């Protein structure tokens, strides 16, 4: 029994370690998307077209590996049709479309800081879904995050604020919260590659149909994109958006959620904000005002406090699986 318990702990520790690596890789990959998208949007691309090409390329890249992983287990897809559809529409297409529209109206870092109030939304969802009343620490964290959000929006100094951009960023927040919750659901039996490929395919089809119906503006351009004073051929950022910020980012993100759970995965994913600020500085010479950076610290600190105030999960949530495997 002692040996089995030790083996379970080792396996769980290994899952946590690999989960952290996947989460950091996903955060860095996602963090690059806003800066790459801004270059395309400024060169004449619409947000809808950029997102559609991005997730379409990722879907093509992941489709064959996903089919190999399924190995004829189509019943898994049939049983999870609603989950894949919701993931594709809300967590993929909706989230990325809202974020790209947001960065078209405001700085990349500010838009992402607003989006990353998503972990607080995850806590609220888990509270409503499972009936866990927020404790004092959670309420304190929410208050600190709210103060941080006000500073990020720079309302105090009277600076001009894009209300449209804020609304789009909040829409992206809802999509990100959905992404964290659905990605961490391990009970559905869907391999991460299958969920990612399915969601990306659904998202591509939905945006494509919306474009054909002229519900979402679709405009493309072959004008070179500008980054930090340099000109780059238009297809280079598109390929990077599809392969790195979508295919790699979603696959590693789901793998992280499966190993860490939605709570810890969304916590580690906050490093995306740091990555996005770094990429925006390097590629766009763009940095938020000092008061917005202070607000970002408050906002992230509030999110951390909220996460720490959640009911603690068992140290090894998948230990039971490890024991059976051993």
Image (tube, rainbow, N blue to C red):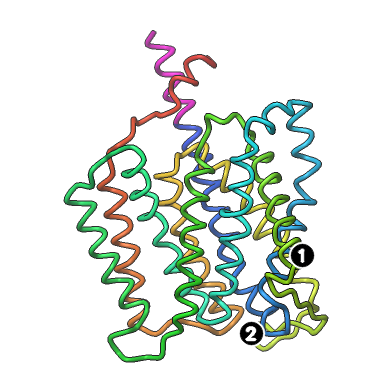
Looking at the picture, tell me which residue is in the foreground, 38 or 73: 73
Query: How far across and how far down the image is residue 293, in percent?
Result: 37, 77
Q: For the point 66% across and 46% down, which residue is it? A: 196
Q: Is 227 left, or right, of 118 in this rendering?
A: right
Q: For the point 79% across and 33% down, which residue is it? A: 68
Q: CA distance from mark 1 to mark 2?
A: 19 Å
Q: Which residues are magenta?
A: 1-12
Query: How far across and how far down the image is residue 247, in percent?
Result: 69, 53
Q: Secondary structure at mark 1?
A: helix
Above or below for 78 versus 273: above
Residue holding disc 2? 228
Above or below for 258 versus 277: above
Q: Is residue 307 magenta?
A: no
- Which residue is the extreme one toward the top? 1
Q: Mark 1 Cα within 10 Å, few/some/many (few <14, many 20+)? A: some
Q: Mark 2 Cα within 10 Å, few/some/many (few <14, many 20+)? A: few
């Amino acid at each position: 029994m002692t040996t089995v318990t030790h083996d379970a702990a080792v396996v769980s520790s290994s899952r946590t370690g690999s989960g952290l690596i996947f989460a950091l890789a996903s955060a860095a990959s996602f963090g690059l998307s806003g800066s790459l998208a801004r270059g395309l949007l400024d060169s004449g691309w619409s947000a809808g077209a950029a997102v559609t090409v991005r997730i379409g390329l990722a879907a093509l890249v992941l489709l064959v590996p996903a089919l190999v992983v399924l190995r004829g287990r189509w019943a898994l897809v049939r049983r999870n049709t609603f989950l894949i559809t919701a993931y594709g529409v809300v967590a993929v297409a909706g989230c990325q479309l809202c974020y790209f529209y947001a960065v078209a109206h405001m700085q990349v870092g500010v838009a992402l800081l607003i989006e990353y109030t998503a972990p607080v939304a995850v806590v609220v969802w888990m509270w409503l879904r499972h009936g866990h009343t927020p404790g004092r620490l959670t309420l304190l964290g929410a208050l600190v995050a709210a103060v941080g959000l006000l500073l990020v929006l720079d309302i105090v100094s009277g600076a001009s604020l894009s209300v449209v951009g804020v609304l789009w960023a909040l829409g992206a927040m809802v999509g990100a919260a959905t992404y964290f919750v659905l990605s961490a659901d391990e009970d559905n039996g869907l391999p991460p590659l299958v969920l990612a490929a399915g969601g990306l395919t659904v998202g591509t089809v939905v945006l494509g149909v919306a474009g054909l119906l002229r519900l979402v503006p679709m405009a493309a351009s072959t004008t070179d994109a500008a980054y930090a004073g340099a000109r780059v051929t238009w297809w280079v950022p598109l390929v990077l958006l599809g392969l790195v910020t979508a295919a790699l980012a979603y696959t590693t993100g789901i793998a992280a959620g499966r190993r860490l759970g939605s709570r810890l995965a969304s916590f580690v994913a906050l490093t995306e904000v740091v990555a996005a600020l770094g990429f925006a500085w390097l590629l766009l010479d763009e940095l938020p005002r000092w008061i917005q950076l202070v607000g970002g610290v408050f906002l992230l600190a509030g999110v951390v406090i909220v996460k720490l105030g959640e009911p603690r999960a068992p140290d090894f949530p998948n230990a039971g699986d490890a024991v059976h495997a051993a």
